Image (cartoon, rainbow, N blue to C red):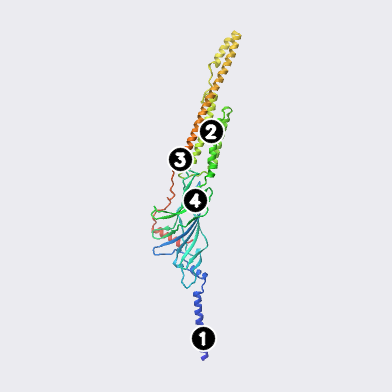
């Protein structure tokens, strides 16, 4: 009987030690994956709820890259990597776990949504599929934003253009609750060229004139003018130069008129080809549009002047319906009357006088042609001088205009200053908490 009691006591002591050991292993034998699963099971898909309903997210660094800039539609496409941290006390763990950090899938916890106020289209992708959680509940996360923003740059002096384009990165703020982003000055630029445009720098800036101070990235852009000079400015200048030199061609034969018509047609075709590539410029239309209009008008006027002078050199008149002047001695009626009178005489003197009149008429016709031709060439020289002076004045005016700051744009007029209502705040929270993405 005593042996049976001793055996029962030993079994009781052994079972107690086993439970104690298993309890200690449950508290201290949980690995990182086990701890991560415990936090995942909490299903913390809503933001951390502070007393003032404000969630603070620290943007530790931003990496910016310009992918492209559409000069015609005035849109800039960018890639932005954002590294952020925030505090979520519910994701912390007790001191009996000897882990300083763990990894949790990004879709299993709440992550902040960044608002781009002036974005046309934005795609948000997590930089990694996991987030890092520290023991005190600090969450480290990184996202990549692919965004297109509307950016109106002053293209008046195109292609000699430098401009600034804002990318507004903010949280959201309603009447009672808000997501507050604390953006650091650690903004770096990756890459510099996007086609003909180059990104010279990117800095963090603040718009203090708004009711609430709002932050944005100020991207400074400049254009490489070499391509536009070769494809736009140089051809138009060479065509004007060719038209100016064509004043040296003679009127006879119609070579000058044919050449000037060819120049007008060539320049018109040149404009039609470049129509889809020329920038619009928004409110600040490029001066290049007016330059092309000026060139086309000058070419057409030069062609018309050449046609008129050709008419003047032949007929001595610019009126298309006016007939050629006939000298009175060349009139057929007096000559016929004289011949009729001399026909009766039948003398040799009448034949000699007929030959003299004929030669005099030929000399007078040649003199008229030479006079008309000399007057036409004189007018042609005057037109050449007028064109040359006009081109010189045009170049001077063009240089003066490009040096002046005529057109200004405001890229910070996209802020929404309306005050939201409580109903909107409630609906936003209802959607955000019940339909997470």
State the count of labels: 4
Among the two numbered marks 4 and 1 on one chain, the one whose residue lies closer to the N terminus:
1
- Which mark is in front, 2 or 1? 2
- Dot 2 lies on which element? helix
Numbered mark located on residue 10 in the image: 1
Q: Position of residue 409 (x, y in %)?
A: 44, 46
Q: Residue at x 50, y 59 (%)?
A: 143
Residue 270, placed above or below residue 337: below
Task: Give the crowd class for mark 4: few <14, some 14-19, many >=20 residues within 10 Å.
Answer: some
**Secondary element type, mark 4:** strand
First reached walking from the N terminus: tag 1 or tag 3 = 1
- Which quadrant holds residue 423? bottom left
Q: Secondary structure at mark 1?
A: helix
The residue tagged 4 is 200
* Distance in Å between CA atoms under marks 4 and 1: 81 Å
CB within 8 Å, label 1 to label 3: no
Q: Image height check: is 358 above or below 246?
A: above
Which of label 2 and label 4 is nearer to you?
A: 4
Q: Position of residue 368 (x, y in %)?
A: 54, 21
Tell me, yes or no, if residue 9 can be seen here. Answer: yes
Contact check, label 2 and label 1, Cβ < 8 Å: no
Instruction: Mark 1: give few (<14), some (14-19) or many (20+) Cα within 10 Å.
Output: few
Image depth: mark 4 or mark 1 in front: 4
* Residue assigned mark 2: 244
Between the C-alphas of marks 1 and 3, the distance is 105 Å
Q: CA distance from mark 2 to mark 1?
A: 120 Å
Indicate which disc residue 401 carries: 3
């Amino acid at each position: 009987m005593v042996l049976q009691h001793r055996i029962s006591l030993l079994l009781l002591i052994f079972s107690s030690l086993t439970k104690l050991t298993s309890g200690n292993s449950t508290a201290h034998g949980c690995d990182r994956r086990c701890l991560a699963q415990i936090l995942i099971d909490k299903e913390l898909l809503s933001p951390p709820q502070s007393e003032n309903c404000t969630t603070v997210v620290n943007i530790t660094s931003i990496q910016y890259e310009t992918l492209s800039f559409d000069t015609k539609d005035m849109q800039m496409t960018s890639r932005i990597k954002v590294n952020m941290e925030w505090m979520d006390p519910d994701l912390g763990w007790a001191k009996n776990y000897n882990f300083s950090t763990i990894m949790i899938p990004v879709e299993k916890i709440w992550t902040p949504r960044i608002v781009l106020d002036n974005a046309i289209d934005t795609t948000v992708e997590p930089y990694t599929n996991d987030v890092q959680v520290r023991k005190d509940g600090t969450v480290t996360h990184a996202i990549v934003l692919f965004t297109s923003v509307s950016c109106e740059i002053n293209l008046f002096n195109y292609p000699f253009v430098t401009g600034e384009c804002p990318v507004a990165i903010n949280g959201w703020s309603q009447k009672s609750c808000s997501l507050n982003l604390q953006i650091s000055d650690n903004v770096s630029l990756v890459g510099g060229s996007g086609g003909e445009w180059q990104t010279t720098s990117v800095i963090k800036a603040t718009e203090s004139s708004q009711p609430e101070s709002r932050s944005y990235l100020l991207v400074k852009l400049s254009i490489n003018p070499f391509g536009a000079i070769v494809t736009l400015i140089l051809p138009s200048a060479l065509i004007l130069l060719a038209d100016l030199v064509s004043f040296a061609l003679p009127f006879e034969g119609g070579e000058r008129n044919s050449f000037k018509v060819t120049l007008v047609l060539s320049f018109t075709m040149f404009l039609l080809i470049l129509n889809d590539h020329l920038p619009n410029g928004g409110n600040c239309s490029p001066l290049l549009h007016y330059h092309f209009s000026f060139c086309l008008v000058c070419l057409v006027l030069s062609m018309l002047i050449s046609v008129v002078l050709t008419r003047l050199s032949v007929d001595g008149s610019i009126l298309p319906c006016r007939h050629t002047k006939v000298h009175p001695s060349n009139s057929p009626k007096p000559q016929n009357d004289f011949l009729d009178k001399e026909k009766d005489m039948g003398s040799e003197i009448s034949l000699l006088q007929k030959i003299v009149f004929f030669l005099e008429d030929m000399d007078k016709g040649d003199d008229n042609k030479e006079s008309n031709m000399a007057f036409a060439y004189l007018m042609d020289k005057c037109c050449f001088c007028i064109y040359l002076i006009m081109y010189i004045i045009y170049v001077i005016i063009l240089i003066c205009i490009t040096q002046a700051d005529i057109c200004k744009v405001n890229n910070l007029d996209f802020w929404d200053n309306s005050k939201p209502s409580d109903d909107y705040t409630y609906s936003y929270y209802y959607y955000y908490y019940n339909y997470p993405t």
